Amino acid sequence: MKYITFAVPSYNSQDYMEHCINSLLKGGEDVEIIIVNDGSKDNTKKIADKYAKEYPSIVKAVHKENGGHGSGVNKGLELATGLYYKVVDSDDWVDENALKKALETIKKLHKEKKDVDMMVVNYVYEKGDKQKVISYEGTLPENKVFTWDEVGRFKTGQYLLMHSVLYNTEFLRGTGIKLPEHTFYVDNIFVYYPLPHIKTMYYLNVDFYRYFIGREDQSVNEQTMIKRIDQQIFVTKTMIDFFNPYDYWETNKKCAKYLIHYIDIMMSVSTILMQVSNTEENMEKKKELWAYLKEKNSKLYKTCKISVSGLSNLPKFISIPGYRIAQKIYKFN
């Protein structure tokens, strides 16, 4: 049985994908690794085929036309046979000891017939010789199956990312999720869309995912994000359109609060990037985005205006220094 399927969307990844795959192979026969070569023009295909040949019972190499990161995630989910589904970007890696602990926990839960919809682990920003661990200690109950009712208040900088979640494969398929193709930043959709469907969770307090930061062409590089601001805005609007968080307020208040928190963060990121860019065009896009939120969900708009994203919408001489301080603290780009 495969307990975790790791999907590795790969595009022109020849320079770093082997480090990623080698870290996943530490899971042995308990894991499945699906390398999705997304129309690469370098040696990504050759490297993927090499691993598939060398580890035929663990590694699958899939070659497809370029469709973007979301397309690779979709393909991995389509082919996954593991109990849980985890996306690992080809320039990132996982910690060997944390992987072994996660597998031990998953096996134990499965044996006790306590499979959960979502497992949460810590991730680590890796930026040169500097590291910043993002954990959920004090917010999520540890080493037990829990529900939304037991979730605490998420602290600043402490929100769920693709790096920190493992979804039950059949649960995730059941949500009907399908990420947009040829679009960056869809990892936010991957985390956000399933949240209202989640009934059970488990938090394992281990530093599992190592998130590499620092390549100039990386999608989360500040200047790259500014150049791709239209895609950030598209993803933010898509998430606004999915559902109204307040619809869950009476039945699942903790989940509703987190959904609101997530939209607030998305609005903040989009807003501050347009502030930093300091172009007339992006200032107009910023106004349009806030107008869009107001039209689609006036209650959510009012909440965001007085929260984190509202602070990012303050005059530039206030909001940008605050953003720079957060950069230094949380090492996010």
Image (cartoon, rainbow, N blue to C red):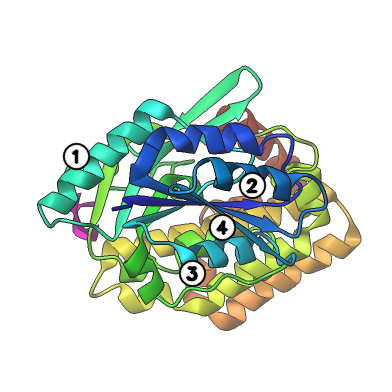
Secondary-structure class at tag 3 = helix
Q: Is label 2 in contact with label 1 (beta carbons under 8 Å)?
A: no
Q: CA separation, marks 3 and 2?
A: 18 Å
Position in image of residue 114 (x %, y %): 15, 56
Quarter assignment of residue 216: top right
Name the residue nearer the viewer: 133 or 66. 66
Q: Earlier in the sequence, mark 2 or mark 4?
A: 2
Q: Amino acid at mark 4?
A: Asp
Residue drawn where x is 40% and y is 72% of the image: 173
Q: Earlier in the sequence, mark 3 or mark 2?
A: 2
Position in image of residue 94 (x %, y %): 47, 34
Q: Give the magenta range.
A: 145-151
Q: Amino acid at mark 3?
A: Glu
Q: Which residue in the structure is indicated by mark 4?
A: 187
Question: Does residue 148 appear in this view?
Answer: yes
Secondary-structure class at tag 2 = helix
Q: Which residue in the structure is indicated by mark 2?
A: 48
- Viewed as shown, does residue 91 lie left or right of 151? right
Q: Which residue in the structure is indicated by mark 1?
A: 143
